[in-house]
Image (cartoon, rainbow, N blue to C red):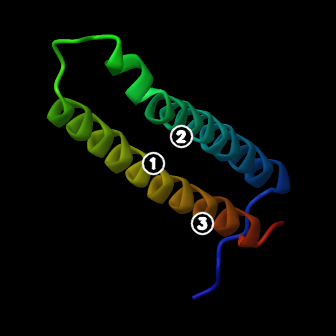
Amino acid sequence: MQAKKYPADFILKRINETRQIADDLQVFINRLGEQKDGLSETLSRHLWLGESFMQQEESGLSETIDSALKLLQRMEKVISGFRKLPTL
């Protein structure tokens, strides 16, 4: 079975679309990191929020960041795969 070849512009368009999604995801990860970094300052202004709430929120942000980083790694693999496709 022979590998299907694709026009170079088709592949480049897919790479660019995927790169944009990966870039947006990186911005999202950065913003989550900023929120996590500022969490204690923000929550300390609210006297009725206890320490357990802050720990829970920090844990939730950490899990979301980890998930987003895994997705970003997958996006990079997709981009790499597009670059390896045979062209016409």
**Furthest residue toward bottom:** 1
Crowd tier of the residue under label 1, counting other residues whose Cα lies within 10 Å: few below 14, some 14–19, many 20 or above = some
Q: Tell me the quarter of the image containing the C terminus.
A: bottom right
**Residue beneath the point at 18% across and 19% down:** 49
Q: Nearer the viewer, mark 2 or mark 3?
A: 2
The image position of residue 50, as x and y in percent, is 16, 26
Considering the numbered disc 3 on the image, is that residue within a helix, a strand or a loop?
helix
Q: Quadrant of residue 83?
A: bottom right
**Residue beneath the point at 55% across and 30% down:** 31
Considering the numbered disc 1 on the image, is that residue within a helix, a strand or a loop?
helix
Q: Is residue 36 above or below residue 85?
A: above
First reached walking from the N terminus: tag 2 or tag 3: 2
**Residue beneath the point at 71% across and 70% down:** 85
**Horizontal side, residue 85 vs residue 62: left or right:** right
Q: Which residue is mark 3?
A: 77
Of the pair 14 and 47, the residue shown nearer to us: 47
Mark sitting on residue 68: 1
**Residue beneath the point at 40% across and 28% down:** 39
Q: Disc 2 and disc 3: Cα gap in Å?
A: 18 Å
Q: Disc 1 and disc 3: Cα gap in Å?
A: 14 Å
Q: Are marks 1 and 3 in contact (CB under 8 Å)?
A: no
Total numbered labels placed on residues in the image: 3
